[in-house]
Amino acid sequence: MTLLLAVGAIFMIAGTAGLLRFPDLPTRLHAVAKADNLGLGFIILGLIVHTVSNGAGAGVVVKLLLIWALALLGTAVNSHLLAVREDDG
């Protein structure tokens, strides 16, 4: 569990570093979208392991997976809208 959370945090930090370091919007979007979604996935998996080991119900696991799915969808839509806006002008 701790390893999953640590790997997730490392990916989140890498995505933030890419956001601050890369020069233009498309590369920044790529860094944030890929690294942060992967980091969130590892964090969610660590939380699922923690909740299952503590005897929580399946409802908590479903809610965690729903949070991850909504974050993936939100990041994809947001990245697309920002890239289209940047392309226009």
Image (tube, rainbow, N blue to C red):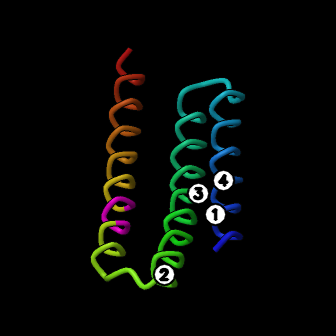
Label 1 vs label 3: CA separation? 8 Å
Label 3 vs label 4: CA separation? 6 Å
Label 1 vs label 2: CA separation? 16 Å
Residue that label 3 marks: 39
Q: Are marks 4 and 1 in contact (CB under 8 Å)?
A: yes
**Hey, what amino acid is under mark 1?**
Leu
Q: Identify the residue shown where x is 46% and y is 76%.
A: 51
The x and y percentages for residue 73 are: 32, 53
> Along the line of sight, which residue is nearer the eye, 61 or 34?
61
**Dot 2 crowding, Cα within 10 Å, few <14, some 14–19, many 20+:** few
The x and y percentages for residue 17 are: 70, 36
Q: Write the start and end of the magenta stretch as one range.
A: 64-68
Quadrant position of residue 87: top left
The secondary structure making up most of the magenta span is helix
Residue that label 2 marks: 54
Quadrant position of residue 75: top left
Q: Identify the residue shown where x is 35% and y is 38%.
A: 78
